[in-house]
Image (spheres, rainbow, N blue to C red):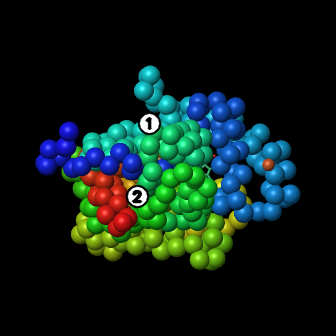
Amino acid sequence: MPAPASIPSPAPDTALVLVNLGTPQAPTPREVRRYLSEFLHDHRVVDLTRWLWCPLLHFAILPVRSPAVAKKYASIWLPGTDGGSPLAVHTRRLAQAVQREMPQLRVVDAMRYGEPKLASVIDRLHAQGVRRVLALPLYPQYSTSTTASVGDVLEKATGVQARMVEDYHLDAGWVDAVAGSIHDHRATHGAGEHLLFSFHGLPQRFVDAGDPYAHHCEASARAIARQLGLDDGAWTMSYQSRFGREKWLEPSTAATLQSLAERGLRQVDVVAPGFAVDCIETLEEVAMMLAEDFAGHGGTLRYIPCLNDTPAHAQALAAIAQRALGDWR
Ligand SMILES: C=CC1=C(C)c2cc3[nH]c(cc4nc(cc5[nH]c(cc1n2)c(C)c5CCC(=O)O)C(CCC(=O)O)=C4C)c(C)c3C=C
Ligand SMILES: [Fe+2]
Ligand SMILES: [Fe+2]
């Protein structure tokens, strides 16, 4: 029977896959080690020669980091049958929210590392009759370490045509959604004296080699601040979650908060617009550890949650996907 005219015609051969980084299956040293091992073996993430990196990874980093990081995951793990790692739970709920915005096609979630594994999700969709897969990596700002790594998996996909949204760091709907969430948070909880945009960091070497990530982060922060009508002095941007010893993008979020405290600021709002959903880096590192450090300086750090599965986020991502599908002829 033909579909009624008011309902968008179904496109069962097309699927939208929201792809996130990945996360451990349980907050245990064993599962964290399994996850970190897959993640940190990706040449896109760590490009050191294997004979140097593998011994370091297997004999030093994984044995020491896994139990320490497992404790951090345990401190943010969501309880209940629907619970789990916040990154996995929020990504799944976000895919369900986008599905409600796009009833005409299949919307699913997948992870670059761990489960549900992107390659397996594509195989399953193919077995179910899907022929076109649009991947939307949940990284607003493009980086070779994240977005291009999703592209590597898509290139190997067989039986389907696969495309990817490269970035959405200046998408008007997304900028609006982030600015709206900051505005609403400040209306409910009060506005701090300063707004800090904290992005995940990256080795400076990547940017020097042409990775546009830092430019994208700067452009996102400027666009959101403009949308909020903030004066230049009312906001700053910084980079968090440094890993290893080499030089990463600066200034760091920790050092920035310290200098804001030294300038006498006591109420700082922190938002993390590089993260589509809350995860260990926002919940444990910013909302717990950095907030504790800032309290040690006599201040209050108010963390503004990621967009997660809010309607504004789902609508912005649906519009981005719709545009990409419209261009796919
Ligand atoms: C060389 C190391 C890393 C690079 C480069 C890197 C880039 C990068 N990462 C994200 C987003 C996320 N990273 C997350 C966790 C995480 N990141 C690294 C290392 C690098 N990231 C590690 C080792 C970890 C795991 C936690 C830890 O051991 O400290 C997460 C959260 C995952 C979760 O389960 O909650 C996200 C999201 C971006 C956007 C990015 C480059 C721009
Ligand atoms: Fe190895
Ligand atoms: Fe990371």
In this orientation, which residue lies closer to the viewer: 178 or 265? 178
Picture disc at residue 316: none
Asked if ligand 1 lies within 8 A of label 1, the reply is no
* Amino acid type indicated by mark 2: Pro
Residue beneath the point at 39% across and 48% down = 13
Find residue 132 and report its image quarter: bottom left
Which residue is under mark 1?
89
Q: Earlier in the sequence, mark 1 or mark 2?
A: 1
Tell me where residue 249 sits by quadrant.
Answer: bottom right
**Is the residue 229 above or below the residue 54 in the image?**
below
Query: Which secondary structure lies at badge 1?
Result: helix
Can residue 172 be seen here? The reply is yes
Could you tell me the amino acid type at mark 1? Val
**Residue for point 35% across, 60% down:** 325
**Dot 1, how many residues are within 10 Å of its Cα: few (below 14), some (14-19), or many (20+)?**
some
Q: Is residue 235 visible?
A: no
Q: Quadrant of residue 251?
A: bottom right
Seen at 65% across and 33% down, the residue is 31
Of 146 and 98, which appears nearest the observer? 98
**Is 89 placed above or below 325 here?**
above
Q: Residue at x 31, y 58 (%)?
A: 322
Q: In the rendered image, which residue does mark 2 sit on?
A: 273
Residue 326, how many percent across, how many down?
31, 63
In the image, taking residue 303 as reference, residue 147 lies left or right, namely right
Is 327 placed left or right of 148 in the picture?
left
Residue 143: x and y in percent read 54, 65
What SS does tag 2 mark? loop
Crowd rating for badge 2 (residues with CA inside 10 Å; few <14, some 14–19, many 20+): many
Nearest to the eye among marks 1 and 2: give it: 1
**What whole-number distance in Å separates the C-alpha atoms at marks 1 and 2?**
18 Å
- Quadrant where the C terminus sits is bottom left
